[in-house]
Every structure is written in C-alpha cells, then in structure tokens.
Image (cartoon, helix red, strand yellow):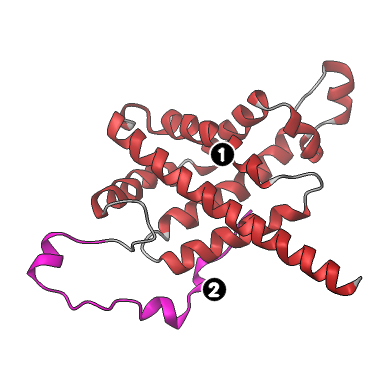
Amino acid sequence: MGCELSKLATPKAQNQTTTEPNATTEANPTTDPRLPLTAKQKYTVMASWKAISRELVATGVFMLMRLFEEHEELIQMFSRFLDSKSKEECGQQFDMVELKKHAEKVMAALDESIKGLDDMDVFLTCLHQVGATHTKIPGFNGQYFWKIEQPFLQAVQQTLQDRYSENVESIYKITIKFIIETLIEGFNKAQNNKAQSTAANS
C-alpha cells in the first residue's frame, strides 16, 4: 500500500477555492464539504499525527499484529507473512521481517493520506488507488477493510499514550471510518471495471 501524493496533484485541485477570504472565513475556517471533519478536528488529527509519523513502523507493526491476532482468517490471505517452518512447529506465526515491510507500506499510505487532508482530490485519489490494489489479492473482499478499524485505533492510542484523550479518540474514529469508506470505494470501482472488461472481452 502506498502512493506518492505529490505525483497525483492536479490543476483542478490547485484551483478549487471559489470563495474570497474575508473576516468571517478567517475567523471560522471551513473544510472541503467532502471531509467529515471540522477545521478544528482536521487540525487536531494532523497535529497529533506528527507524533505517529515519528513512530510509523512501530505503530504499523503493532496495528498489524493486533489485526492478525483478532482476525486469524486473514493470515492465510496474507500467507507471505507466515514463516512456514515456524508455522509447522509452533502454529500460526508471523514472519516479522515481511510483516515489518508491509507495515511500512500500510503506514506510508496512511501517513500521506492524513498529511493530505488539506487537498481532498489528492486524498481521495490516493486512497482509491490503494483500495484498487487489493483487488489483486485472491479472495479479498472490500468489507475486510473494516477489520483494520479497531487495530488502527489501538495502535494510535499505543503511540500517543496520554495524548490520546476522549476528544482525540472521537476524531480518529471519524477519520479512520472515512479512510475505510474511501478504500472500499476504490476497491469496488476497480472490481466493477474488471468485471466490465471481462464481459467485454468474452
């Protein structure tokens, strides 16, 4: 998972502002209507995320470990994370090297997405592309993205520690829900395109 937001920027995104700045908008900054966060909530996420950015890999490994602990059925789907020898001797085990590599990719995508909350065109395009890549995983269902919701929140709490207040938690719940919904949109769109292409060639 991962994309370079800078490469996805478009003139449309850059020329999106339609209102002229005035005293009202400066005092009460607004956000893109597609973003389910207020300007203050968006600032809270982006500000607190800086601490997570400094611990991306550790946060990602913790998140994926929780994901696979809570949803063992996904281990087979991501079988490259298993050490076959350890699996035979000790049951389901993670190949930590591969898990770390995937954690880096997952967190890089989340990092770029959250840092891109100021530009919804870029944010949506990035996550749609990430969602689409999961159509390459045999047996993957778009609804599986919801399984990362709680592990993500647990990982954020683990990293932020006492900075993870009730207010911050509620904002991250909104944020991860929006991210997952966008990933599913990208996945479903790619699935539909595949189906149409197959039908056209049959």
Q: What residue is pinned by disc 1?
A: 60
SS at badge 1: helix
Q: Is residue 123 above or below residue 144?
A: below
User: Is there any visible trace of residue 95 in the rendered image?
Assistant: no
How busy is the neighbourhood of tag 2: few (under 14 within 10 Å), some, or many (20 plus)? few
Q: Residues within 10 Å of mark 1 (few under 14, many from 20)?
A: many
Looking at the picture, which amino acid does disc 1 mark? Answer: Gly
Identify which residue is drawn at 80% across, 34% down. Answer: 76
- The disc labelled 2 sits on which kind of residue? Lys
Q: Which mark is residue 7?
A: 2
Residue 73 shows in the view: yes
Q: In the image, which residues are magenta?
A: 1-30
Figure check: 200 above or below 43: below
Magenta segment includes 107: no
Q: Quadrant of the C terminus?
A: bottom right
Residue appearing at x 64%, y 53% in the figure: 1
